[in-house]
């Protein structure tokens, strides 16, 4: 029987981490059978799949884990996050207004980055031609990154008022831009936004105009602006001009800070965050992270939540003498689930009324392309490392992350780059999104120390450098347990060399 039918191998949760098609009795039955197995592996998938997809993938992993002598349990907390993001981004990329804004923002970014005058107040940047830009942007159609080799002039200065004004003048004089704005207004929803939610009730599409997926509040701004000039014989585009100027200013600032993601990707990221925030997946991503934490909240209170309920049930077996060797394997967003599990286990160990012994710990923590942010990652390594004997991370080198398109045509870098550049919130202000937010699975945050030297990044860098076996940067092969040939974010768990490395760790211990 496959995991798809056999609840002895998986725990499924829904919104708020509450048990879904897995019942409390199913979990009790699963835990009751565990003392028959001295070695356990708990697998936490990423946020890219539905329940069916997660369980189908578990069939391959189940056989591999059992071949290594470990009994698997799969934690399924599906969201279909990537499908939501891809669908919306593909629609956004078809919009005339989006393509026009990308073209003009790229032109002015290139002009500014090549400015050798050090930021003169005239605004007279040397801009590439429309034809040259169009030819380069066609690379995105093949999943390649336009202007990938372009760097900023070493004396780059912030965008000045004259340069910003020139962008706004160029846009306002573009008849195609004016027509696209008119189309948005003409197709605006008269009675508010049209919304779509996923099975967990999370808003995935929030549309206020049939011609764009811009956030409803942006569409409302545009509509109000146009209405104010009605009857005056002009079409006002002032709202979008203001936003375009703000986007260009942030793009230039990121290059000055050396926290850009390349010309094209930085422009796209800032454009999406400024105008399309409601529909780029930020809400779904935030929901996923919250669910990974919520499943360990309200311990002991109904309804049962998959995380704490499983740990509490197993704790009683361990208190009665069961001493399993337990390995944790988390892919992508599964790393966030593991972090929250470690926090709960620490709380349980130190609670005199909890059955989990104070000496309980895991054998290994293995992360595949972890999507956990570096603040939480540093907290895990600093404050919960005593809960596991060994740690290993399998993830791509930066050139691999930069060479794999998450959404071909629109975004030619990896999912982790997109999360870092568009979806993550500021460490110090959770109400604000932040650009270039450090993500644990991204090599750039450990090798570019001249730019990335915050306390949490310095701590992670030191931890990984203290034992080179703690990180495997695909593609590389340093022998048993230290090899990975994964070349895409979603492939780590089943890529043959990576899977063989995990099997080796399960069978033979720390390599």
Image (spheres, rainbow, N blue to C red):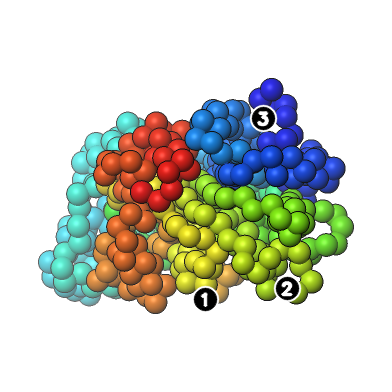
Query: Considering the image in quadrants, where does the N terminus appear?
Result: top right
Question: Looking at the image, is mark 2 or mark 3 earlier in the sequence?
Answer: 3
Residue 53 to residue 151: above or below: above
Viewer can see residue 22? yes
Say which residue appears at 26% left-offset and 64% top-offset.
448
Q: Which residue is mark 1?
A: 428
Mark 2 lies on a secondary structure that is loop
Depth order, front residue of 159/250: 250
In the rendered image, residue 198, in percent from the top left (x then y), is placed at 70, 42
Q: Which residue is mark 3?
A: 3
Q: Which residue is mark 2?
A: 351
Mark 2 closeness class: few <14, some 14–19, many ≥20 residues within 10 Å: few
Say which residue appears at 31% left-offset and 48% top-offset.
473
* Between marks 1 and 2 in the image, the one whose residue lies nearer the viewer: 2
Say which residue appears at 68% left-offset and 49% top-offset.
203
Depth order, front residue of 194/314: 314
Question: Looking at the image, is mark 1 or mark 2 earlier in the sequence?
Answer: 2
């Amino acid at each position: 029987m496959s995991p798809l039918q056999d609840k002895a191998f998986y725990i499924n949760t829904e919104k708020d981490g509450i048990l879904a098609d897995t019942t409390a009795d199913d979990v009790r039955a699963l835990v009751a059978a565990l003392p028959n197995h001295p070695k356990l592996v708990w697998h936490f998938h990423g946020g890219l799949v539905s329940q069916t997809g997660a369980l189908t993938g578990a069939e391959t992993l189940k056989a591999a884990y059992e071949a290594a002598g470990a009994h698997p349990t799969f934690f399924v907390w599906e969201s279909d996050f990537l499908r939501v993001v891809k669908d919306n981004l593909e629609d956004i990329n078809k919009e005339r207004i989006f393509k026009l804004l990308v073209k003009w923002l790229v032109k002015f970014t290139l002009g500014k980055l090549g400015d050798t005058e050090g930021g003169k107040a005239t605004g007279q940047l040397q801009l590439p031609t429309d034809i040259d830009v169009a030819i380069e942007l066609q690379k995105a159609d093949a999943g390649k990154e336009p202007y990938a080799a372009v760097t900023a002039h070493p004396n780059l200065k912030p965008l000045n008022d004259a340069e910003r004004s020139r962008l706004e003048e160029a846009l306002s004089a573009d008849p195609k831009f004016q027509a696209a704005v008119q189309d948005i207004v003409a197709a605006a929803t008269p009675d508010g936004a049209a919304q779509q939610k996923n099975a967990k009730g999370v808003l995935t599409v929030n549309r206020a105009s049939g011609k764009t997926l811009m956030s409803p509040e942006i569409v409302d701004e545009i509509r109000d602006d146009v209405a104010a000039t009605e009857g005056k014989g002009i079409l006002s585009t002032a709202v979008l001009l203001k936003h375009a100027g703000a986007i260009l200013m942030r793009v230039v600032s990121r290059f000055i800070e050396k926290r850009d993601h390349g010309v094209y990707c930085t422009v796209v990221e800032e454009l999406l965050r400024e105008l399309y925030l409601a529909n780029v997946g930020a809400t779904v991503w935030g929901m996923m992270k919250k669910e990974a934490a919520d499943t360990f909240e309200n311990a002991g209170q109904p309804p049962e939540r998959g995380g704490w309920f499983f740990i509490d049930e197993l704790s009683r077996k361990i208190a009665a003498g069961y001493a399993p060797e337990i390995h944790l394997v988390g892919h992508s967003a599964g790393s966030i689930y593991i972090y929250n599990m470690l926090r709960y286990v620490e709380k349980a160990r130190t609670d005199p009324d909890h059955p989990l012994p104070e000496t309980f710990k895991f054998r290994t923590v293995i992360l595949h392309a972890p999507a956990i942010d570096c603040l939480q990652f540093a907290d895990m390594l600093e404050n919960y490392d005593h809960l596991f004997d060994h740690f290993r991370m399998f993830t791509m080198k930066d050139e691999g992350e930069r060479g794999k398109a998450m959404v071909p045509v629109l975004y030619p870098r990896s999912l982790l780059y997109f999360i870092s550049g568009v979806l993550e919130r500021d460490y110090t202000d959770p109400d604000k999104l932040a650009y270039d937010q450090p993500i644990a699975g991204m090599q750039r945050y450990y090798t570019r120390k001249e730019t990335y030297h915050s306390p949490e990044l310095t701590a992670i860098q030191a931890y990984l450098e203290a034992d080179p076996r703690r990180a495997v940067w695909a593609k590389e092969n340093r022998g048993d347990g230290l090899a990975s040939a994964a070349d895409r974010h979603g492939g780590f768990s089943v890529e043959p060399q990576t899977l063989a490395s995990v099997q080796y760790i399960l069978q033979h211990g720390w390599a």
